[in-house]
Image: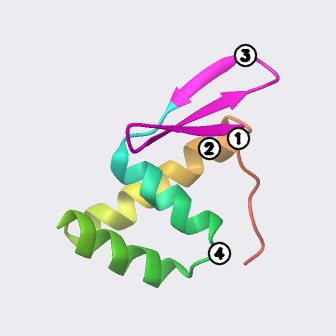
Amino acid sequence: MKTMVDNEIVLLDKATGMYYGLNETASRMLELTLEHRKRDEIFSIIQEEFDVDMPTIEHDFDALLENLINKGLALESEE
């Protein structure tokens, strides 16, 4: 379950009752991912909207997905 609070996403793990807050950049990355955008497109949009260098975007995106998968909040895709 997810909801927006001041441009940030808050996720609820229903199994544990734990809440997880994503900062504005991570929230935007997740939104774009849920729109089924391609990885390169997500990176370009984030770079344009947040003025962040590409290596940082790549690292942060991979870390976000890894954390969501490890916490059981997302499933790994074959794509």
Pointers 4 and 2 in contact (C-beta within 8 Å): no
- Say left or right for 77 vs 49: right
Tell me the CA gap for discs 2 and 3: 15 Å
Extreme top residue here? 17
4 vs 2, front mark: 4
2 or 3: tag closer to the N-terminus: 3
User: Disc 2 residue type?
Assistant: Leu
Precedes in sequence: disc 3 or disc 1: 3
Where are the magenta residues, as a range?
Answer: 1-20
Q: Is residue 12 left or right of residue 61?
A: right
Read off the residue under disc 4: 36
Position of the C terminus, as image quadrant, is bottom right
Q: Position of residue 64 (x, y in %)?
A: 50, 49
**Structural distance between the alpha carbons of marks 4 and 1:** 17 Å
Tag 3 residue: 17
- Residue at coordinates 35% horizontally, 53% vertically from top-left? 25
Instruction: Please state which amino acid type lies under the numbered disc 1.
Output: Leu
Is the residue under label 2 in contact with that under label 1 (CB below 8 Å)? yes
